[in-house]
Structures are given as structure tokens and as C-alpha cells.
């Protein structure tokens, strides 16, 4: 089966086409036919974070060129000989200019060999989610194929099993524990089986990526701040007397809090101005150490309490080298499997939506369920991964 996956929950317009062959070794075999992530991060840098209406406009501009490019890369884009049929464009009333451009494209091209479309329905920024979702609904209606809404966090969880250009998804030993760390989320999720999730903890205020971004801003660095803090931390000698709190490290639950850390950074910055480069590097290193210690401490306790056999680290912050190393060391100490996405799949992408989508589609087919009606598929900005339990 061929799946087109679409992701627009934040500031990336991403599309992937995968071909999934279920006959090989009984394990589904994924082949990536086309894969594209168009980031808007540079455009949002001026705002110091993602600006929802700018994200919406950028998705509106980019989504059709991204579709054409990914279909072309997949060898599925073919011009029609005669351009006589008019295709009625549904679901894009709120985006009239995009509807016109899509209409022209559909009138001039053959229906591609795509069997299913999967789209991120949430969690994410409502204006951004709606562009991808409306576009996916319009395509599914025009091509008369099923559309399956996918949870973005479930995408991050399965991103650890994906890699290009061809891969099989292994059967991990359950229960697995996923530490999901991104710009919008910090969650500890126990996975008892495929598509069965229990959230045991989450941040009560800022997400860990958000804390990286805000700390970067206090140090005069641009958005996204995570990679820059990480780079700066690498320049620290390790010899310093800067000390930051480890918020909620010893609370008897699995929740996190990172806003106090940002406040502590602000106070230190204000009392140490003007900031030298070496001081900034030391602060970045101490910030990274504080975040890492809290994440590792909670994860370690959860591994013991829930008898975890497989560990998963995913989300944009999983790109961080120190956090990757610390979690790998933890899995070694606990003698359990560790799964971390390749660097290019830590941030938002649509390959992870295609993989999650495949599991959802298989479930519909195995259970003989009918696919969701296009009219009922809505953006769900606060959709929790636990509400996806099948
Ligand atoms: O998953 P993601 O691409 O988008 C969301 O769904 O939020 O995560 C983006 C977040 C940003 O906050 C960014 O600063 C952070 O991931 N990030 C990092 C690193 N690379 C990206 N944080 C720490 N260290 C990094 N190397
Ligand atoms: Zn994400």
C-alpha cells in the first residue's frame, strides 16, 4: 500500500510517501518514495518563537509546492494529456487562493497511486493544523481515498523505528517507556502494546524545548534556541560555580516543571551583565545539566516502578547530544533496550506520521472498521496520546 502523510502542526510543512509491503518476513517493510520537510524556523526567528498566524500563512503558501515535489520525487506525478474535467475542490473554503491552485493542479494531473492519506490532527497550533487537515480532506475527497487523522505525539513515539531509505519496524518488548521532549510537550508515557498508552507524567508549565528556547533568548541567541544552547554548552570548561535548581526532581510523581529554571536563569543573567562568552558557555552547560538530571531521575524511577523493558526518547529535544548520551547510559545501567530517532527524525517530520498511520490503517483493516467520514475529521489542538488507545 502507498501512504501519503502530511504534517503541519507547528512550523514545518512536511510530506512523505511510503510504500509498505506486508509480505516480506511478515514484518511490514517500509520504503520511502518521497520525503520533504520545509521548515519555517528562520521566518519565526524574528518573533523569538512560533507565531501561529505566520505559520498558517506559510503552510498555505508551501503546502501545494511540497505536495508536487514529494509526488514528483516518488515518481507519482504525471500530467494529463487532456485537461477537460473540472475537479470540485471541497473543504478549502477558508483558503480560496489555495483551492484555486489545487484545482488547477488536479485538473492537469493523473490521480496518483496513493491508497491512503494520513494527516496530523493534533496536538499542535490550531491555525497550522487546520491548513494541513483541510488540504488533506480536499485531496482525499478529490482522489476518493480514505483519510486517517494521526496524533503527533504517537508519531514522535514511532519515529524511533524509522530510518531511510528502507526499514522494518521491529517488535519492541513491552512495556515500553517513552520520554517525549519537544517545544510543546514533555511527557512520560508507558506503552503497554502498540497503540496502547498511559501518560504517567507531564510538565505542569513550560515544555523542556520551550525552556531551552527561552534560556537561549535570555542569552541573546535566536530561535530555535535548543541547538545553540547545546553548542554553547560544548564550549564550557566545566569549571564554574554557576548553580541552577533541579525543579521537582524529588517530587513523588512523574511531573516536570521548567518555568522556575528559566526564572533562575533570568536572575543570574541580570546580576552578571555584561556577560562574557565563557560565562554564557558555563551557564548553558549548567542549564543542560539541570534539565538532563531531572529527566533522567524521573525516567529511572519510572523504569523500576513499571517494569519497563524498552526505552524510547523522542521529540525535537532528543537531538540534544548530552540528553541522548545520558539516556543511553541509563538504559545500559538498567539493561534495557533503548530507541532514539536518527538526528533528522527528532524534529517534526511526516515520516513518523506515515509510520503511525500504517499501524492505524492496519487496525482499521484487521478489525473491519470503516474509515472515518471526511466531514467528521477535525483538528484537535489538545489531543492527548492516551485518547488514541485503540
Ligand atoms: O519536536 P519539535 O521539532 O517541535 C515540537 O513539536 O515542538 O521540537 C522543537 C524543539 C525546540 O524547542 C528546539 O529548541 C528543541 O526542540 N531542540 C533542541 C535541540 N534541537 C532542537 N533542544 C535541545 N538541544 C537540541 N540540540
Ligand atoms: Zn513535535
Image (cartoon, grey):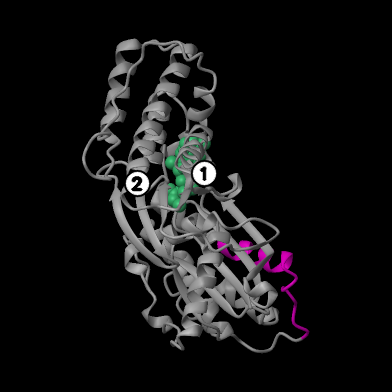
Is residue 45 visible from the viewing direction of this image? Answer: no
Q: Position of residue 152 (x, y in %)?
A: 44, 60
| Dot 2: element | helix
Residue 76 part of the magenta-drawn span: yes
Is residue 228 visible from the viewing direction of this image? Answer: yes
How packed mark 2 is, by other alpha carbons closer than 10 Å (few <14, some 14-19, many 20 or more), is few
Left or right: where 134 falls relative to 342: left
Left or right: where 59 falls relative to 192: right
Q: Nearer the viewer, residue 206 or 365?
A: 365
Q: Which mark is residue 41?
A: 1
Magenta highlight range? 63-81
Where is the C terminus found, in terms of image quarters? Answer: bottom left
Left or right: where 8 falls relative to 65: left
Q: Within the image, what quadrant is residue 351 found in?
A: bottom right
How packed mark 1 is, by other alpha carbons closer than 10 Å (few <14, some 14-19, many 20 or more), is some
Q: Specify which label sits upstream in the sequence, 2 or 1.
A: 1
Against 313, residue 379 (above or below) is: below
Residue 106 part of the magenta-drawn span: no
Q: Nearer the viewer, mark 2 or mark 1?
A: 2
Q: Position of residue 87 (x, y in %)?
A: 58, 85
Left or right: where 35 falls relative to 258: right
Against 40, residue 162 (above or below) is: below
Q: Which mark is residue 304?
A: 2
| Dot 1: element | helix
Amino acid at each position: 500500500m502507498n501512504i501519503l502523510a502530511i504534517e503541519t502542526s507547528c512550523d514545518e510543512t512536511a510530506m512523505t510517501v511510503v510504500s509498505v509491503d506486508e509480505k516480506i518476513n511478515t514484518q511490514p517493510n517500509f520504503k520511502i518514495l518521497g520525503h520533504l520537510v520545509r521548515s519555517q524556523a528562520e521566518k519565526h526567528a524574528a518573533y523569538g518563537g512560533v507565531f501561529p498566524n505566520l505559520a498558517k500563512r506559510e503552510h498555505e503558501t508551501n503546502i501545494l509546492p511540497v505536495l508536487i515535489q514529494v509526488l514528483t520525487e516518488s515518481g507519482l506525478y504525471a500530467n494529463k494529456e487532456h485537461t477537460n474535467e473540472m475537479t470540485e475542490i471541497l473543504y478549502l473554503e477558508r483558503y480560496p487562493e489555495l483551492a484555486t491552485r489545487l484545482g488547477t493542479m488536479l485538473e492537469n494531473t493523473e490521480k496518483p497511486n496513493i491508497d491512503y492519506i494520513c494527516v496530523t490532527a493534533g496536538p499542535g497550533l490550531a491555525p497550522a493544523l487546520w491548513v494541513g487537515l483541510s488540504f488533506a480532506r480536499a485531496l482525499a475527497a478529490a482522489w476518493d481515498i480514505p483519510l486517517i487523522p494521526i496524533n503527533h505525539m504517537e508519531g514522535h513515539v514511532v519515529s524511533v523505528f524509522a530510518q531511510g531509505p528502507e526499514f522494518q519496524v521491529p517488535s519492541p518488548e513491552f512495556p515500553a517507556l517513552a520520554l517525549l521532549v519537544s517545544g510543546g510537550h514533555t511527557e512520560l508515557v508507558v506503552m503497554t502494546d502498540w497503540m496502547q498508552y498511559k501518560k504517567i507524567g507531564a510538565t505542569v508549565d513550560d515544555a523542556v524545548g520551550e525552556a531551552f528556547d527561552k534560556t537561549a533568548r535570555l542569552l541573546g541567541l535566536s530561535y530555535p534556541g535548543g541547538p545553540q544552547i547545546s553548542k554553547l554548552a560544548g564550549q564550557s570548561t566545566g569549571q564554574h560555580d554557576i548553580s541552577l535548581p533541579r525543579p521537582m526532581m524529588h517530587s513523588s510523581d512523574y511531573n516536570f516543571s521548567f518555568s522556575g529554571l528559566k526564572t533562575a536563569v533570568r536572575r543570574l543573567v541580570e546580576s552578571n551583565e555584561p556577560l562574557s562568552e565563557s560565562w554564557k558557555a558555563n551557564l548553558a552547560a549548567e542549564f543542560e545539566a539541570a534539565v538532563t538530571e531531572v529527566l533522567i531521575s524521573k525516567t529511572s524511577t519510572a523504569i523500576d516502578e513499571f517494569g519497563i523493558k524498552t526505552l524510547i526518547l523522542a521529540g525535537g529535544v532528543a537531538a540534544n547530544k548530552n540528553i541522548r548520551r545520558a539516556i543511553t547510559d541509563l538504559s545500559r545501567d538498567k539493561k534495557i533496550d533503548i530507541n532514539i530517532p536518527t538526528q533528522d527524525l527528532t524534529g517534526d517530520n511526516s515520516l513518523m506520521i506515515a509510520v503511525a498511520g500504517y499501524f492505524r490503517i492496519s487496525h482499521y483493516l484487521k478489525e473491519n472498521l470503516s474509515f472515518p467520514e471526511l466531514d467528521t475529521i477535525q483538528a484537535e489542538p489538545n489531543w492527548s496520546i492516551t485518547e488514541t488507545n485503540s
